[in-house]
Image (cartoon, coloured by chain):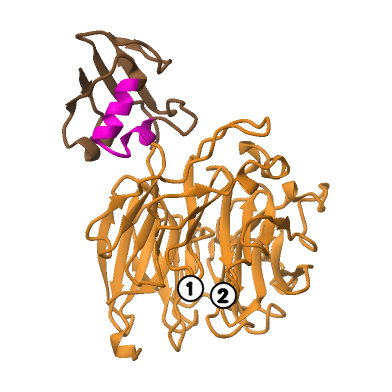
Amino acid sequence: MRVLIPSALRSYTGTDWVHATGDTVAAVLVDLERQYPGIRFRMIDEQGRIRRHIRLFRRQQMVFDLAARLEDGDELLIVQALSGG
Amino acid sequence: MSANHIHPAVLVATRKGAWIFRGDASRQHWRADGPHFLGHIINHMVLDPRDGRTLLAAASTGHLGPTIFRSTDFGASWKEAERPPAFGPAVNGLEARAVNHTFALTPGHSAQPDVWFAGTSPQGLFRSDDGGRSWSPYSCINDDPQYRKWFGTVQDGTPDGPKLHSIIIDPRDPDHLYFAMSGGGVHESVDGGRHFAPLIEGLQVVEGFDATDASFHDPHCVRLCPSNPNRLYQQNHCGIYRLDRPASRWQRIGVSMPAEVGDIGFPIVVHPRDDNTLWVFPMDGTDVWPRTSPGGRPAAYVSHNGGDSWVRLDRGLPGAQAWWTVKRQAMCADAQDVVGLYFGTTSGELWYSRDEGESWACMAQHLPEIYAVEVTELP
């Protein structure tokens, strides 16, 4: 499926949209890590929690549970929440 | 090495990236190389003195998790650590934690060329055995119930998170280690880090709290004298201290500072060859703790007698209306015959002295808030 990468993480991917496989959000993130080593830890902490200023969206809905299932045709949008100064 | 072959480089870590200022042999002319990692929060950048080429930078951003970047070509290219510092899963019935940022990087003993140590926020101690590529937690600290109590909560730490810092390796013995925590006190290991114990006797705490409890201790910066590894100096939340081992009781040496300035500050810098000479950079620790230069008149203070007396060093620094200060990792000394001093300010100015603090000049201004300054030598 297509995954939208936020600007802060494009140093890993080199592009905004990438392809990754998996039937859950967690599995897609694992596939992203396989393709772009280091990218997952910047989004997900060592306890498996989505970092404070990272947001994941599927079908216009925010994802809170990495076990959320993805279906054919879904796109995963990764965005950086407003923060900082 | 003759003076003609020395090319000093000042490694500057800031809230918005990192810079390397390369100097000539006279330390009079400097060239800015950067920014590196523009927009990233860089808490510390350190060159490995053992190989003279491995540069590590502790990075995070406002949005992303923390990591370590590594360069072996003096910053021309960077590669991310394969396994940055990260805590383990929950054990001992304790809450699982996540590293917010790596704060301090310390090369290991000269006899252990690939070993590095890292201190994090929240407080955690980590070690790399492969030159900074992968990092492992010290569970005996990070997951120990007693240490967890001493760590306190996020509210007990500094405004941008409690920190483990001032990791010191005894140059005579790689198994002899110290570290400090804000908050949580100073700790020592004599068995290579398998066990640590508090080293807080003689240190004061905020009035009304129990000085025997490491939880209430806030060492800001601890340094060991290269010329006398038995001697440690410390800038603490509650004054300036000296400790001469094997004694274990810290002596408050800041009491001889001018009363109108006080002995509160963040950094402390030791002379590379004279264990009686040290520098501090006081800040206003009165009232609501402005953490600015006292009276808006910044100055370093030097002692040449182990802290018995102090001399103000402000020639060249602003004489009024300068309300910045210097953070705990943002002041250092080089090792030249006439020692050079370097510090970065919260207002993004980089200052240096070529004469041990007798006079100061501004190397750069308008940088982001400076978190750390290290000086080294590059080819």
Specify whether A79 is left or right of B68: left
Q: In the image, which lettered chain appears brown?
A: A
At horizontal 64% and vertical 83% (from top left) the residue drawn is B276
Specify whether B21 is left or right of B116: left
Q: Which residue is mark 2?
A: B171
Q: In the image, which lettered chain appears orange?
A: B
For badge 2, the amino acid type reads Pro
For badge 1, the amino acid type reads Ser
Instruction: Write down the quadrant of residue B7 in the picture.
Output: bottom left
Boundaries of the magenta span: A27-43
Q: Position of residue B186 (x, y in %)?
A: 68, 58
- Classify 10 Å Cα crowding around label 2: few (below 14), some (14-19), many (20 and above): some
At horizontal 54% and vertical 59% (from top left) the residue drawn is B328
Can you see residue A83?
yes
- Quadrant containing the C terminus of chain B is bottom left
Q: Position of residue B180 (x, y in %)?
A: 63, 57
Distance Cα–Cα, label 2 vs label 1: 8 Å
Q: Which residue is mark 1?
A: B110
Tags 2 and 1 touching, CB below 8 Å: yes
